[in-house]
């Protein structure tokens, strides 16, 4: 017999643990002798079920809907969520307030939670860090520990059946419900693998009905379907997926008493950074549907009183501590070995470097790699190892053999953790004009939707035997202001599978000996774009040029993560 027996009700299959027949007889006898009053649990048919459909970033609108329901006194006795809807449902069921959930998403740094392993495994993006993050946010809760009954909906990858998950940790069920095939790996639960429930049941109102809900409010997030570009590969893939998913919706939403259909712009489905925008859309959609919602409840119970309420959640200081703990837990999650390529520019010695780094796996936060610097004097072949994260700081140590130098060059670069948008940097190189540099970097100095500025204050130590300098010229003081301009503001251009935010950058570096004011100028400019892979994983690519104080042009290439 299977470890988990499947009890089927219509098209729904719920995971339950087997119970001996004798125990069932005892329980039945006790209920007959000592009947209990009805409660707002699944077993006693919850009056109101809220079904939150899938829709990637569009699912952030569910937060606004929750706010509308609270303000209008609409109770929520059961939550059913698919894909992104399962995350919102799980957080709310665990006791987080609407404001808490907004802060969770606005403070989310997905670079610490998601990895792109090479070669890829069960999915293009590794999500072990995300699962640890969710589990910490949810306090490791299992379903019976939730304040409100909650059922993430997923698809069994082997059988193809839709299942409402209700055994084990809630975070695991949510992870299964959001496991987009090909993007995220399938999730193992009780010897079975599960993927995104949106494949076959994007809006699981039928699941709520099978669970015994009397009143069902379902939210269907759908695309406005602008004119198609059939010569665009990404456009064709996304439209095909939407068409497949929408084919199941009409049947699945049939039991809903109130169906809220929220139409979204087609090209915003991976705009995860627009939290406030989607929250506002959901809030207005809830208010517009409120008359229908109240009518459905009053038809069931004419005496019902709609009393506004707010889920308490946790105070901001406590939430910040939970978020910090979740980030640290995610950082410690075991990850597969990952190969990361990149381009960077050495501003001290004016050359572009290509690198390829092996990290994660048994290396943890360490990285081992190879770089090549495109400069005969200060570049060349280089091996390095590094360590760090944004919250802990960085350390990089290297050994380089330059074509025009007999001896190898060694050095290091250190970055402090960020504090109040400030970072301390220290660089040392054993050969070259510049021996060392210490910098205080502030980024941003100020930020607007269309521009961001940065500033670096530098103390530079020169090497006399390279420059034939007098002792009084060994130290230089420098300043490097930069500006990045986004011509289209906060707009992101969908170029599936990425979102692109083009920019222009310009900067000037001014340095002078401490002994006398004799400024030297260097100028740089570039064009580039910030990239969000699947709307989740940030990258930045740029091309530019730098004019040094000797009027030589140096080309710049940047690919950062």
Image: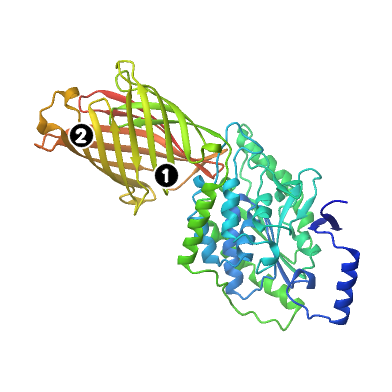
Q: Is residue 324 left or right of residue 86?
A: left
Q: Is residue 168 left or right of residue 64?
A: right
Q: Which of label 1 and label 2 is nearer to you? A: 2
Is residue 63 placed above or below 457 in the rendered structure? below
Residue at image position (68%, 45%) is: 242
Q: Secondary structure at mark 1?
A: loop
Residue at image position (62%, 56%) is: 87
Q: Nearer the viewer, residue 538 or 202?
A: 538
Q: Which image quarter: residue 68? A: bottom right
Image coords of residue 435 (percent x, y)? 24, 31
Is residue 51 placed above or below 35 in the rendered structure? above
- On the question of residue 346 being in view, the answer is yes
Badge 1 crowding class, 10 Å Cα cut-off, few under 14, some 14 to 19, many 20 or more, is: few
* Color scheme of the displayed model: rainbow
For residue 488, the mark is 1
Image coords of residue 158 (percent x, y)? 79, 43
Image coords of residue 366 (percent x, y)? 47, 38
- Residue linked to disc 2: 461
Q: Nearer the viewer, residue 76 or 92?
A: 92
Q: Nearer the viewer, residue 20 or 186?
A: 20
Badge 2 crowding class, 10 Å Cα cut-off, few under 14, some 14 to 19, many 20 or more, is: some
- On the question of residue 276 being in view, the answer is no
Q: Is residue 469 left or right of residue 501?
A: left
Q: Is residue 160 left or right of residue 100?
A: right
Q: Secondary structure at mark 2?
A: strand
Mark 1 or 2 closer to N-term? Answer: 2
Image coords of residue 1 (percent x, y)? 88, 51
């Amino acid at each position: 017999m299977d470890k988990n027996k499947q009890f089927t009700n219509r098209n729904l299959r719920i995971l339950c643990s087997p119970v001996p027949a004798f125990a069932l007889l005892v329980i039945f006898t006790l209920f007959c002798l000592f009947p209990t009053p009805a409660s707002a649990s699944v077993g006693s048919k919850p009056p109101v079920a809220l079904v939150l459909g899938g829709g990637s970033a569009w699912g952030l609108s569910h937060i606004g809907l929750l706010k509308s329901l609270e303000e209008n006194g609409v109770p929520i006795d059961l939550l059913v969520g698919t894909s992104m809807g399962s995350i919102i449902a799980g957080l709310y069921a665990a006791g987080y307030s609407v404001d808490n959930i907004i802060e969770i998403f606005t403070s989310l740094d997905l670079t610490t939670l998601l990895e792109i392993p090479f070669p890829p495994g069960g999915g293009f993006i590794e999500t072990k860090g995300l699962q640890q993050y969710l589990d910490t946010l949810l306090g490791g809760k299992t379903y019976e520990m939730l304040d409100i009954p909650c059922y993430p909906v997923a698809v069994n990858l082997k059988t193809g059946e839709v299942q409402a998950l209700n055994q084990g940790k809630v975070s695991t069920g949510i992870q299964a419900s959001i496991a987009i095939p090909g993007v995220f790996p399938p999730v193992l639960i009780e010897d079975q693998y599960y993927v995104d429930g949106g494949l076959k049941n994007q809006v699981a109102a039928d699941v709520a009905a099978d669970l015994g809900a009397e009143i069902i409010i379902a939210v269907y997030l759908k695309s406005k379907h602008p004119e198609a570009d059939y010569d665009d590969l990404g456009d064709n893939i996304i439209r095909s997926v939407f068409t497949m998913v929408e084919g199941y919706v009409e049947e699945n939403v049939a039991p809903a008493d109130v169906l809220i259909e929220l139409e979204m712009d087609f090209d915003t489905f991976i705009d995860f950074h627009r939290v406030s925008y989607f929250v506002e859309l959901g809030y207005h959609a809830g208010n517009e549907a409120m008359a229908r919602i109240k009518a459905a409840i009053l038809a069931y119970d004419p005496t019902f009183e709609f009393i506004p309420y707010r889920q308490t959640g946790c105070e901001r200081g406590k939430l910040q501590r939970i978020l910090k703990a979740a980030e640290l837990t995610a950082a410690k999650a075991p990850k597969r070995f990952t190969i990361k390529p990149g381009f960077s520019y050495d501003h001290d010695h004016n050359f572009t470097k290509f690198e390829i780094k092996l990290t994660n796996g048994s290396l943890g936060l360490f990285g081992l790699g190879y770089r090549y610097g495109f400069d005969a004097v200060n570049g060349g072949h280089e091996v390095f190892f590094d360590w760090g994260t944004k919250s802990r700081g960085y350390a990089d140590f290297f050994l380089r053999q330059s074509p025009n130098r007999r001896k190898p060059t060694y050095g290091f670069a250190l970055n402090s953790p960020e504090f109040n948008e400030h970072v301390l940097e220290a660089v040392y190189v054993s050969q070259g004009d510049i021996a060392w540099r210490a910098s205080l970097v502030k980024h941003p100095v100020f930020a607007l939707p269309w521009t961001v500025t940065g500033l670096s204050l530098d103390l530079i130590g020169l090497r006399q035997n390279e420059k034939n300098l007098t002792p009084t010229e060994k130290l230089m003081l420098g300043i490097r202001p930069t500006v990045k301009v986004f011509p289209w503001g906060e707009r992101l251009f969908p170029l599936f599978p990425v979102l692109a935010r083009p920019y222009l950058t310009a900067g000037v570096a001014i340095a002078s000996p401490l002994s006398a004011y004799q400024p030297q100028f260097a100028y740089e400019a570039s064009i580039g774009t910030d990239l969000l892979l699947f709307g989740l994983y940030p990258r930045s690519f740029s091309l530019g040029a730098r004019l040094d104080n000797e009027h030589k042009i140096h080309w710049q290439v940047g690919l950062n993560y």
